[in-house]
Amino acid sequence: MDMLRIENTLFTIVMLLYFAAMVLYFVFIAVKKDGVAKAAAILQTVGLVLHTAALICRGIGAGRLPLTNQYEFATSFAWGLCLVSLIFIWKFTFPMLGAFAAPVIFLIIGYAAMQSKAVKPLMPSLRSNWLGFHVSTAIIAYGAFGVSFVLGIIFLLRDRMKDQSFWDRHVPAKEKLDLISYRSVCLGLLFLTFTILTGAIWAERAWGSYWSWDPKETWSLVTWLVYAVYLHLRIRRGWQGRAAAIFAVLGFICVLFTYVGVNTFLPGIHSYA
C-alpha cells in the first residue's frame, strides 16, 4: 500500500508538471521567447521521469505490470505520447511540437485521473507473459500515432499563422514536417502490427482462438488498415502534404475510438482496458 500511496502522489505531481509545461508552451507562443520553450520542454522531461517512477511504483504496489485496466492503460498512453513527442522535440529542436502535444497529453492523463485506481485481482485470461508484450507495444503505437496527429495539425495550420517568421524559426519546412509525420506513422504502424500479432497469440492460448471479432480487435484492425492505406497511398501514389496530414488526423480519431469509444459503446472481452 505504501507504493500505491507514493504512486498516487507522483501521479498528482506529474499532472501538475504536464499542466505547467502546457501553460509554458502557450506562453512561448505568446511571447516568442526561446527560453520559455526550453523551460517547458525541461518540465515535460521531468514529468516523464516522475511518470516513469509512478508506473514503477504502481507495478510494485500491484504486484504485476501496471497495464491491465482503464486507469493504467490511460496513464501509460499519456506516458507513451510524452516519450515519443520528447524524442522528436529534442531530436529535431522542435519546441512547437510540444506546444501542440502537451494539451493532448494533459487530456489523456486527465482521463486517467477520472478512472478507478483500485487494484483488483487479475482475471485468469490476463495472467500471461504476453500481457507485457501486447500492451507495451500498443502504448508505443498509440504514442507514435498521437505525435503524427499533432504533426498533421501543425502542418494544416502552418500557412494560416500570421507571424510566418516565428513559425519559420520554430517549425521545420513543410517537406520536413511531412517526412517527420511519415516516420511517426511508420513507427506506430510497426508497433500496432506487433500489438495485433501478440494479441492473437495470447488469445489463442487464453481462449483457443486467434481472432474472435471482439469490438476492440475489430477496431484495432480498422485502425491498422487506415494507416496501411496511408502508407500505400504515400509510397505508390505519392500522397504527401495536406492530404497526408488530413489522413494522419483521421487515423488518430480511429485510435481514440478504438481506445475510448469501444470501451464506452461496444463492450466486449477487452472491456477491462
Image (cartoon, grey):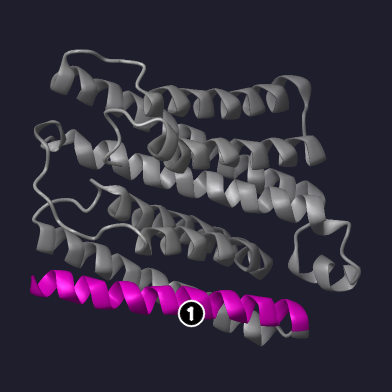
How many labels, in total?
A: 1
Q: In which quarter of the image is the N terminus?
A: bottom left
Q: Main secondary structure of the magenta part?
A: helix
Expressed as whole percent of the image width and height from the top left, the position of residue 9 reads 26, 78
Is residue 98 left or right of 220 when viewed as pictured?
Answer: right
Given residues 262 and 181, the one toward you in this image is: 262
Residue sitting at x 61%, y 47%: 148
Considering only vertical position in the picture, is 197 above or below 85?
above
Q: In which quarter of the image is the C terminus?
A: top left
Expressed as whole percent of the image width and height from the top left, the position of residue 38 reads 59, 80
Visible residue check, residue 203:
yes
Let me know if residue 13 is in the magenta part: yes
Residue sitting at x 34%, y 22%: 214
- Disc 1 secondary structure class: helix
- Amino acid type of the residue tagged 1 in the rendering: Leu
Residue sitting at x 91%, y 68%: 162
Considering only vertical position in the picture, is 184 above or below 234?
below
Is residue 30 left or right of 39 when viewed as pictured?
Answer: right
Let me know if residue 194 is in the magenta part: no
Mark 1 neighbour class, 10 Å CA radius: few under 14, some 14 to 19, many 20 or more:
many
Is residue 43 left or right of 49 when viewed as pictured?
Answer: right
Given residues 207 and 45, the one toward you in this image is: 207
Q: Name the residue under label 1.
A: 43
Choose top left, top right, bottom left or bottom right for residue 134: top left
Visible residue check, residue 191:
no
Is residue 221 left or right of 133 when viewed as pictured?
Answer: right
Expressed as whole percent of the image width and height from the top left, the position of residue 55 reads 25, 62
Residue sitting at x 76%, y 81%: 30
Given residues 250 and 34, the one toward you in this image is: 250
Given residues 227 and 263, the one toward you in this image is: 263
The residue segment tinted magenta is 1-30
Considering only vertical position in the picture, is 28 above or below 65?
below
